[in-house]
Amino acid sequence: MPAAAHAADPAHELGRALAERIEARAALYATSETPPSPALAFLRERLDRERRAALDRLRHAWHARLAPFDEAERSAVDAIVAILWRQGAAAALEDRLLAELLAGAGGEAARTLAILCRFRSRLEKDRAAAERDLAELFRLRPKPLERPGLGPERLEWLAAKLRLDRAKAEERPPRPRAPEPPTEAPPAARPAASTPRPEPRPPVNRPALVLRSATPEPAADRLAAASPTRRDSLRGRLLSSAAPAG
């Protein structure tokens, strides 16, 4: 059948449209719907077409399993994908170097293999760090509200109802405010009653105390104050004792 007849055949047009749709669906499943992170995009641009398609399939598989929620989680998953791709490339290069060493290659292959071993150990550390970052992002995810009856349609209906109620409330005239009852003035404070002062009592006349002088009286005055009989008898005894004997 000539090409013009194929172009005019509706079955041929339908077959071509189906083939294009199948290819588009295959490309959609082979790659992720979101663009890759800058680090993964830089790695992807350096690959040829076949290896780029293999990297896209690897990224799609990891995104399908881990289901990143936002851009932060997608960047962490892309970091893991890039590390896994580099680990696969390093493993392939290591196999080739080992084959060269077994075939009798020189010391250059041994030095390259030593550098490659250190690179693979660093990739292991980077992968562990990326997995820790992703686990921390999963832990910090916002918790959804547990409302099984509130689906997206129900929430949209509630939002529309709230907007309608608010519009009706704004259109309704304001209610007149009831007059406030007059407030009574507080009673004036009464002055405090003054307490009567007690009358002063008259002074009590008490007898004055006679204090005896602390100065001792002389002996002569005491003798003079004694009785005259006692004084004469004392004088006679003194004179008799002072007279000479015989």
Image (cartoon, rainbow, N blue to C red):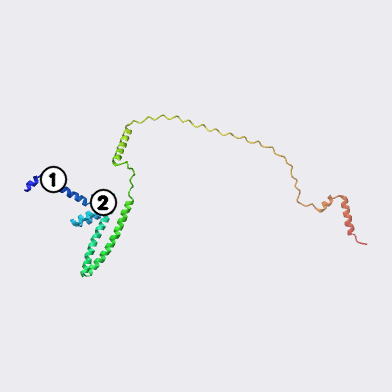
In the image, what residue occupies the spot 7% across and 46% down? Answer: 5
Circle 2 residue? 64
Which of marks 2 and 1 precedes in the sequence?
1
Q: Nearer the viewer, residue 176 or 91?
A: 91
Closer to the camera in the image, 241 or 134: 134
- Residue drawn at the location 90% of the way across and 58% of the way down: 240
Residue for badge 1: 14
Examine the image and state in which quarter residue 120 appears. bottom left
- x and y percentages locating residue 79 in the rendered image: 27, 55
Res 46 → quadrant: bottom left
Quadrant in the picture for residue 56: bottom left
Q: Quadrant of the C terminus?
A: bottom right
Q: Is 215 placed above or below 246 here? A: above
What is the x, y in percent for residue 231?
Answer: 87, 52
Question: Gap in Å between the C-alphas at discs 1 and 2?
Answer: 32 Å
For residue 113, above or below residue 25: below
Badge 1 element: helix
Amino acid, disc 2:
Ala
Seen at 88% across and 54% down, the residue is: 235
Image spot of residue 48 (x, y percent): 18, 57
Query: Label 2: few (<14), some or many (≥20) within 10 Å?
Result: few
